[in-house]
Image (cartoon, grey):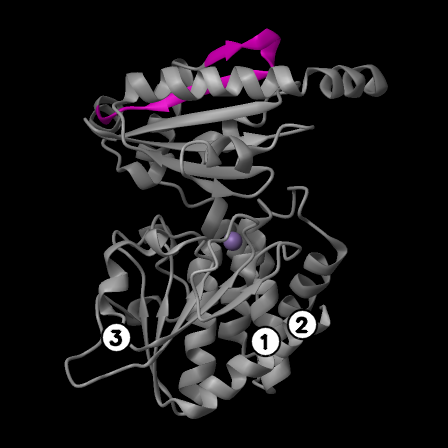
Amino acid sequence: MDGSLEQLYTQVGGLIDAHQEMLILGHKDADGDTLGCSLAFAEALRTMGKRVWVIIPPPVPQMYDWLPGYDQIVERPPADADPQLVLFFDAGNMERSGTAVRHIAAHATIVNIDHHLTNAMFGDLNLIDPKAAAVGEMVIDMLDSYGYEITPTIATNLYTAIMTDTGGFRHENTTAEALEHAARLARLGADPGQIASMVYKSRPLTTLKLNALSLAEMRVEADGRLVWSKVTRRMLKEAGAVMAESEGIIDNLNSIGGLDLAILFKEVNDRMTKISVRSRGAVDAAALTAEFGGGGHLRAAGAEIAEPMEKAVELVVAAAHAALESTAGSSEARRTQSR
Ligand SMILES: [Mn+2]
């Protein structure tokens, strides 16, 4: 951990000492990292006698309803509360927390704890560590620096954060440090087999049906370097699924050999299309989504585009080809090298 980050952790510790009531905010389309961190940190704060409310923009994914503390997620703080300290975990920008930000008091102090390269630095304090595989790793460091005990339930939440953000310890962000943190959490009571089975082996049939419908319309372009597909409202209806169940489709696309860019288009409504992007080699997923007001990581990013599906496909596929062309040299070199 670098020194300036450690200083910021100490500053946040001072703020926590100075406040009795606080809000924890996650991001919409909540994932294991934002949920695990929010629930873990809330437990630690409650143990210290603080009043804490965890707000996750709805719909909160049901697939995580087994996480310890999930049932304590609320839509807003109670009327008698006036939390003046707000902690964000894993939110690249305020918009990522949707309407939940309405519950922030005008003069509240905002602490932004994140690992996205593209973080908008919206907090009064911004604790950003792009080297952290998951914000879960940063939360471990914070709890350690405050001397908070990592209980088995905190360990379960933080292990889930690290496991899911590394794609089950498979993505490039799976560093020795991430594995060491995970090992420590396993020693403290997280059950790796159980957690993996809750996350990866508990999918409803409707999720697989949606995968099948989406993959059937997969398109391959640029000599196999670009693969894209979509999830339409018609597919959701046909599969009996909700949009949250499309989460794994992009990783299915990204499992194909030889590609540099995988894109999934999700039809929210007539005027809004979301994209998920995965990249390899010299192609930067965050840079591509930034062209459309989005962001994320080098290898995984997303954006919300205020266009109907067809128009979004046209714009993003064109930008994808441009991104691939600008990295053509390095990709060719990489292919030659791997032979
Ligand atoms: Mn994350």
Residue position for label 1: 8
Q: Are marks 2 and 3 in contact (CB under 8 Å)?
A: no
Q: Earlier in the sequence, mark 2 or mark 3?
A: 2
Binning the other alpha carbons within 10 Å of mark 2 as few (below 14), some (14 to 19) or many (20 upward) gives few
Boundaries of the magenta span: 219-233
Residue located beneath label 3 in the image = 105
Amino acid type at mark 3: Ala
Residue type at tag 1:
Leu
Q: Quadrant of the N terminus?
A: bottom right
Q: Is residue 332 above or below residue 122?
A: above
Q: Mark 2 points at which residue?
A: 4
Query: What residue lies at 51% left-to-right and 11% top-to-bottom?
Result: 220
272 w.r.t. 52: above or below: above
Q: Mark 1 near ligand 1 (CB under 8 Å)?
A: no
Task: State the residue at coordinates (44%, 71%).
Answer: 124
Q: Distance between the residues labelled 2 and 1?
A: 6 Å
> In terms of depth relative to the viewer, which is nearer, 162 or 116?
116
Q: Position of residue 254 (x, y in %)?
A: 56, 27
- In terms of image quadrants, where is residue 213? top left
Is residue 235 a member of the stretch shown in magenta?
A: no
Residue 287 horizontal/vertical position (percent) = 54, 34
Pointers 2 and 1 in contact (C-beta within 8 Å): yes
Left/right placement of residue 29 relative to residue 43 reads left
Label 2, label 3: how many angstroms apart (C-alpha)?
28 Å
Q: What is the distance, in whole Å, between disc 3 and disc 1 at their CAs? A: 22 Å
Labels 3 and 1: the sequence-earlier one: 1
| Main SS of residues in magenta | strand
- Disc 2 Cβ-to-ligand 1 distance below 8 Å: no
